[in-house]
Every structure is written in C-alpha cells, then in structure tokens.
Amino acid sequence: MPGVEVNEAGDSDINCGGPDFIDSKDASKIRSRVHYEVVGDTSDHRSPGELVDQAVGHLKSKGWKVERKTCAADDMSTTLSKTGVAGIASIAAKRFTLRSGKDVPILNILVMTDCLPNPDWKR
C-alpha cells in the first residue's frame, strides 16, 4: 500500500526458559516478536485475499514458504516459514468499516522467533 504509514507495535520478548516462581518461565530463553499494522485508504478496494496474496508473493520470492492458509468471510491469514530462519511470519488482512460507512483495508504482519537461548541471560 504505497504512501500509507506503517505502525509498528513495538518489539516484545516473551520468556520461555525454565520454570521461574510458580507458573512463569525465566528469561534464559526468549521468543521475540514484532507486529506491523498498515491501515489502507478508502480508495483501496483490494480484498483481504488480494492483500495477503501480494505480501505472500513477495516473501515467497525471498525463499519463504506457506505453512498454513486460513480464509474466513472478510479476512484471510497465512503463516510462512523459511529454511534457516528460527521463527515464522504471519500475514493477515481484513476490511474495517469506519463511522462514515466507508471501508478501509488493514494488513497485519507478525514476525516471531522460536524459543531461543537468550545471550544476555545471567543467572
């Protein structure tokens, strides 16, 4: 979606190491993730499927492969992986109706690592 601002929902780490306290995990291993959201313009009439397919096509050209594809009435999502990459990318799109009654496309991209050793962990 050229000319549209991308919102980044901060990078966050999820602890997934050994047991810590009662039911939580310590930070000896972490899963990192970043989430991007792109809200399109009302003039963009592409379907959620078209938006996801376009983003997936770009990643496939970079060596990513589709692991799972989910389609619903007004949204679509695809999960991808890549050999040598310890994690996944998930791409989803939907249409959102504004108060004005006009629709805008929303594209969400989540990139998340597997549970990996934390190089900064000190016991």
Image: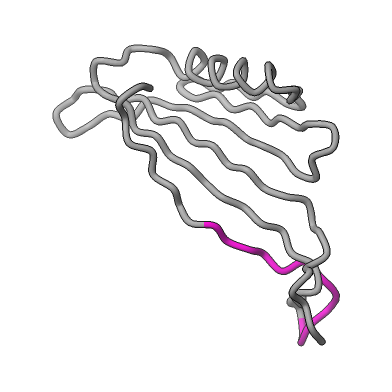
| Residue 13 lies in the magenta-colored region | yes
Residue at image position (43%, 14%) is: 47
Quadrant in the picture for the N terminus: top left
Q: Position of residue 87 (x, y in %)?
A: 75, 44
Quadrant in the picture for the C terminus: bottom right
Q: Position of residue 121 (x, y in %)?
A: 77, 77
Q: Position of residue 62 (x, y in %)?
A: 69, 22
Which residue reaches farthest left?
Answer: 100
Q: Which residues are magenta?
A: 11-22
Residue at image position (31%, 16%) is: 44
- Placement of 109 over or under 112, stated as above or below: above
Closer to the camera in the image, 44 or 74: 44
Identify the image quadrant of residue 46: top left
| Residue 112 lies in the magenta-colored region | no
Q: Position of residue 70 (x, y in %)?
A: 64, 24
Q: Is residue 49 left or right of residue 78?
A: left
- Placement of 21 over or under 3, stated as above or below: below
Q: Is residue 59 left or right of residue 96?
A: right
